[in-house]
Image (cartoon, rainbow, N blue to C red):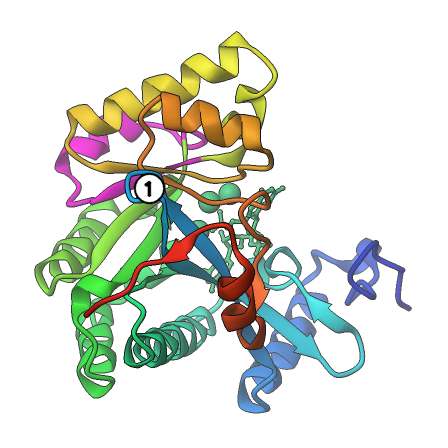
Amino acid sequence: RQAKLEGSGYKLHDPALADTEPQRLLMLSYLRKALADDEFILHYQPKLSLTTNRIMGFEALLRWQNPVRGLLLPSEFIPTMELSDLIHPVTIWVIENAVKQCKIWQQAGYSFIIAANISARNLLDQQLPEKIGAILARNDLDAGFLELEITESSLIADPDRSFDVLRRLHEIGVQLSIDDFGTGYSSLAYLQKLPVDSLKIDRSFVMDSGQGREGRSIVGSIIGLAHNLRVSVTAEGVEDEASLQLLRDLGCDHAQGYYISRPLPVENVCAWLEDAAWEPAQHD
Ligand code: C2E
Ligand code: MG
Ligand code: MG
Ligand code: MG
């Protein structure tokens, strides 16, 4: 049985069975096959620098192009993958493809940073820094052009092991950022210890900031905190011009959101760059 799901085709399973073990195993077998059959794709969402007013990079966001059910969003399949070791090869697939694309853009004259999301479970893989180092070397991309986004909650499962993996990633020159900042907990205690380069303010605060004082002061506080810690700050979920202007006024470094662009299929990126209101970062 399939239930209709708004916007994106069909639910993959009967909600009544969704959390049962057989259902999870079935879903995992579909996902394993999806990886083998090359059904995953990346969409790219631009990031705008508010200091240079240029497009400075893209975040790679995973989608599953299912031949029957159409395009599926991460919320429909990533949680299942994160409960299994399948998240390891999928993350490597994402990083490899994002790095390849970044290299292609670089060869076309753009100077973009590419960001990819990694899951808590990835940080338990002691080999991750070596694997990522090998991807960068294989594609001849400088590590500074790769940014990895992790959520605060990623660090809770096994902080010591996760910290060690993060330290080694930072050592090879990869940029690290804390995603959905403000939604997790114990962030402040960890923040000082972590080798992070930036914070991404969760879109719930950014969207509220347009509405009133409270959201605005949260956003302002996070920007102040980040700058005191000497890390840069990105706002996600920027949906209108007023929010973008407010973020500029508050001294935010980077912005991302539907107002700038929705995540784009790779084949649409060049056309978007030509029409966009902002110039892309380029190298000589
Ligand atoms: P995220 O990393 O916080 O990514 C931002 C999400 O917000 C994306 O949803 C994006 O489409 C959406 N978004 C961007 N701008 C706006 C806006 O202005 N308004 C609103 N309402 N939404 C906006 P998406 O692509 O569905 O991804 C959801 C989450 O799935 C991501 O949140 C990330 O945590 C996870 N994810 C995506 N790709 C990967 C991946 O390759 N690996 C892992 N482990 N997680 C991924
Ligand atoms: Mg992210
Ligand atoms: Mg986020
Ligand atoms: Mg988010």
At horizontal 17% and vertical 24% (from top left) the residue drawn is 228
> What's drawn in magenta, residue-wise?
182-201
Residue 37 screen position, x and y as percent? 59, 91
> What is the quadrant of the C terminus in the image?
bottom left
- Disc 1 residue type? Ile
Residue 260 screen position, x and y as percent? 53, 47
Q: What is the quadrant of residue 242 in the picture?
A: top right
Residue 276 falls left or right of residue 153:
right
Residue 117 seen in render: no
Q: How many marks?
A: 1
Residue 190 lies within the magenta run: yes
Q: What is the quadrant of residue 104 in the picture?
A: bottom left
Residue 191 falls left or right of residue 182:
left
At horizontal 22% and vertical 87% (from top left) the residue drawn is 138
Residue 175 screen position, x and y as percent? 22, 55
**Residue at the disc numbered 1:** 156
